[in-house]
């Protein structure tokens, strides 16, 4: 049936690869670079020049000098820079006198990533430069050793080390889950379409003439083999091209993908049997992608979702799968470290298999 249906051909053979490379190419660089930041330096001292030089040396920031604050604000409003840094007069004097020295940082928060990247980088550099000036003050004026002076400057030292996404980049966080979602949604759309077509064309009887289980898994075997191949391709070729880490055991990840695809097959057929029109099934499933991604706990903490949404999310194989998948791929975990979500996924497989068998059996009885 697949070779005769152009919609299924497009969904199963073109969409997974097209979406994977298209969306992957958007985030292939993962971090932003050379974000425009206006600079207004009314202090014009060695400290302010050092601060500007260190900020401009950051790969994220590209400094644009302005003569006055009005010009910087106007360029920010026009979108020519994503923020501006204002260094008031007497900043160096205040810092050397151990008084509070304030610099003003304004960012365009209409775009989340540039504003957060600018703020993070400028904040770290300001703290570092400020601590360095105070360190020199304690060493020269108080005659303290470097070790004791450092204790005065920074009595509490924060040792910040991201464990798995070292650059804390949005692309490295999003892409592994996005690739898994592409696999899931194209499988669900394709198989549910194919199953809906059985109802639309009144071919339930011919589909199940060799037995209900043979009908379900006969149709599902093609998708199991096809998406098993896609999984191998994504986890090797796409991960390599997009420079994504794969820290876990490949065989354990392969077993997880196998269980996940097995669970999606009866779920997709249950969904398809709910529709009498292949086109309506396609339309509904196409619009389900974004809501599914939002409620699985990948982009928003699962515990912060409303209880009703959590209940719906727990019925989706995506939710337990992503917990194990992310832990293996990004955290280097193992299946034995994720027994609870793995058992959750297996229970969903059994549940949807029984529900699919009952649904096909019911329609088979009605068609005879």
Image (cartoon, helix red, strand yellow):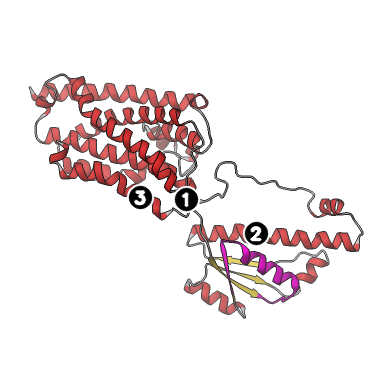
Residue ID at (80%, 55%): 153
The residue that disc 2 covers is: 123
When asked about the image quadrant of residue 130, the answer is bottom right
Which is nearer the N-term, disc 3 or disc 2? 3
In the rendered image, the quadrant that contains the C terminus is: top left
In this picture, which residue range is highlighted in magenta?
Answer: 41-64
Residue name at image x 31 percent, y 40 percent: 185
Q: Secondary structure at mark 1?
A: helix
Q: Which residue in the structure is indicated by mark 1?
A: 171
Q: Nearer the viewer, residue 108 or 217?
A: 217
Label 2 – label 1 distance at C-alpha: 22 Å
Q: Nearer the viewer, mark 2 or mark 1?
A: 1
Is residue 365 positioned above or below 67 on the image? above
Say whether disc 3 or disc 1 marks the residue closer to the N-terminus: 3
Q: Residue furthest right?
A: 143
Q: Dot 1, how many residues are within 10 Å of its Cα: few (below 14), some (14-19), or many (20+)?
A: many
């Amino acid at each position: 049936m697949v070779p005769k249906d152009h919609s299924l051909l497009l969904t199963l053979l073109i969409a997974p690869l097209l979406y994977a490379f298209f969306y992957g190419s958007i985030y292939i660089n993962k971090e932003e670079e050379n974000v425009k930041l206006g600079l207004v330096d009314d202090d014009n001292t060695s400290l302010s020049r050092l601060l500007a030089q260190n900020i401009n040396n950051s790969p994220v920031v590209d400094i644009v000098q302005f003569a006055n604050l009005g010009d910087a604000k106007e360029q920010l409003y026009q979108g020519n820079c994503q923020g501006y840094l204002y260094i008031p007069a007497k900043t160096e004097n205040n810092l050397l006198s151990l008084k509070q020295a304030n610099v003003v940082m304004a960012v365009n928060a209409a775009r989340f990533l540039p504003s957060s990247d600018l703020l993070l980088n400028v904040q770290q550099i300001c703290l570092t430069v400020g601590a360095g000036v105070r360190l020199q003050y304690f060493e020269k004026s108080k005659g303290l050793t470097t070790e004791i002076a450092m204790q005065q400057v920074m009595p509490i030292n924060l040792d910040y080390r991201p464990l798995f996404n070292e650059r804390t980049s949005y692309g490295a966080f999003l892409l592994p889950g996005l690739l898994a979602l592409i696999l899931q949604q194209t499988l669900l759309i394709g198989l549910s379409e194919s199953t809906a077509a059985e109802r639309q064309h009144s071919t339930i009887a011919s589909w199940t003439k060799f037995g209900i289980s043979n009908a379900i898994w006969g149709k599902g075997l093609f998708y199991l083999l096809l998406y098993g191949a896609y999984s191998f391709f994504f986890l090797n070729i796409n991960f390599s091209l997009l420079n994504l880490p794969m820290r876990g055991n490949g065989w354990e990840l392969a077993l997880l993908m196998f269980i996940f695809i097995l669970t999606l097959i009866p779920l997709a057929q249950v969904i398809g049997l709910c529709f009498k029109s292949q086109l309506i099934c396609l339309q509904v499933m196409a619009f389900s992608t974004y809501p599914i991604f939002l409620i699985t706990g990948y982009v928003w903490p699962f515990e912060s979702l409303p209880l009703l949404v959590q209940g719906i999310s727990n019925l989706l194989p995506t939710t337990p799968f992503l917990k194990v998948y992310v832990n293996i791929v990004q955290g280097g975990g193992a299946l034995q470290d994720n027994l609870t979500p793995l058992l959750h996924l297996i229970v969903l497989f059994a549940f949807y298999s029984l529900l699919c068998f009952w649904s096909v059996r019911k329609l088979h009885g009605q068609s005879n």
